[in-house]
Amino acid sequence: MTAYLNAVGLICALGEGRAEVARKLFAADDSGMCAASGWVPERSLPVGAVQAELPPLPADMATHQSRNNQLLLAAAQQIDGDIEQAIRRYGRDRIGVILGTSTSGIDEAGRGIATWLREQAFPADYQYPQQVLSAPANFLADWLQLSGPAYVISTACTSSARALLSARRALDMGLCDAVLCGGVDTLCKLTLNGFCSLEAVSAQRCNPFSQNRDGINIGEAAVLFLMTREPSAEHSIALLGAGASCDAHHISAPEPNGRGAQQAMQQALDNAGIKPGQIGYLNLHGTATSHNDAMESLAVNAIFPDGVPCSSTKPLTGHTLGAAGALEAAFCWLSLAADNTAQVLPPHLWDGQPDPALPALNWATADTRLAPASSRYLMSNSFAFGGNNISLIIGDAP
């Protein structure tokens, strides 16, 4: 079964909507990465914050109020025409909602708990449902009055990539006729302080795969795809392959040789029925931490011994955690879209100083073009704590 990605709404540090995000993505515009204080005590750090004004939630949905849900609403409103068409075609009980997140509304919860510790009372706007991990799916299903399956996957940085894989499975099993799938995560103190405690956060814009790399930047984003079994009238972009593995090497460190990452990429290729040489571009997980980049370099070199154009887009958006898998799949989607007439790919933004200890990769530049082919295939990698690995292949369906 082919799972078509008929529409996409997205918002991140690059901007809001397909046109703005694509323009800045292909120009490697990192202006959305800005130093900010207040997240971590006595430190100013680059973060990929969304600067756009977010839509308010309807007045009768106060229990859903959180920045996370506002980001999701901003993405959903971009494709509301496609969603309404799907509702008319399939019915509200045949549309599922499968999302990934790692933060949900924990930032609002943190502020509420801080108030309680000071005053022994929660603030008037504190709502417990804000912080449960299922909150984004509950909100979207309630807002659209959908009664199909609705749930959230939270597997750290693979959450939304796994949501796309699960959405395809839901269609294949006949549970739904359409699925709203993707992910959303918001900047919050808990996340930033947690990564700082791991000594994994860079004080500069992140520098993936450089010998000078020294950690990640954190960002926020929301991405929402409409997935169905039928192509849209405008294109036939689809999720053609997916691979998942869990090497369980360590609670936070990746398996050093990239064994699990290799398994996920090979599974995705096998699932799509294609060879490594048919992949036209690879969006790397590329967090700019020492261990992740080393592991991924080894894995990519093993799967693509002849090379493949690749880049990490995290210097442009920050690491959006539970939203990253869907966001970077969306970047592949934008690379295939009809309005990308020049066939450009996301360039790799770094200092150009490779790590001599790592295999050399084929970096996409501003001059790199997607090779013309009857079918175009792009891969996106997502790797998470606990050795949780996902690779997705987005392409033109035959």
Image: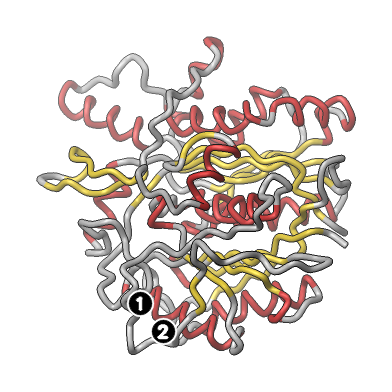
Q: Mark 1: few, some, or many residues within 10 Å (few <14, many ≥20)?
A: some
Q: CA distance from mark 1 to mark 2?
A: 7 Å
Query: Three-letter amino acid code at disc 2?
Result: Pro
Could you tell whether 116 is left or right of 108 in the image?
A: left
Q: Quadrant of the C terminus?
A: bottom right
Q: Quadrant of the N terminus?
A: bottom right
Could you tell whether 76 is left or right of 111 in the image?
A: right
Q: Which mark is residue 291?
A: 1
In the rendered image of this protein, does residue 266 appear above or below residue 8?
Answer: below
In the rendered image of this protein, does residue 199 appear above or below residue 152?
Answer: below
In the rendered image of this protein, does residue 294 appear above or below residue 95?
Answer: below
Residue picked out by circle 2: 256
Q: Residue at x 35, y 77 (%)?
A: 291
| Residue 377 position in % (x across, y down) | 72, 66
| Residue 255 position in % (x across, y down) | 44, 81
Q: Are marks 1 and 2 in contact (CB under 8 Å)?
A: yes
Query: Three-letter amino acid code at disc 1?
Result: His
Q: Mark 2: few, some, or many residues within 10 Å (few <14, many ≥20)?
A: some
Could you tell whether 383 is left or right of 117 in the image?
A: right
Quadrant position of residue 140: top right
Q: Could you tell which of marks 1 and 2 lies nearer the N-terminus?
A: 2
Q: Residue at x 73, y 50 (%)?
A: 167
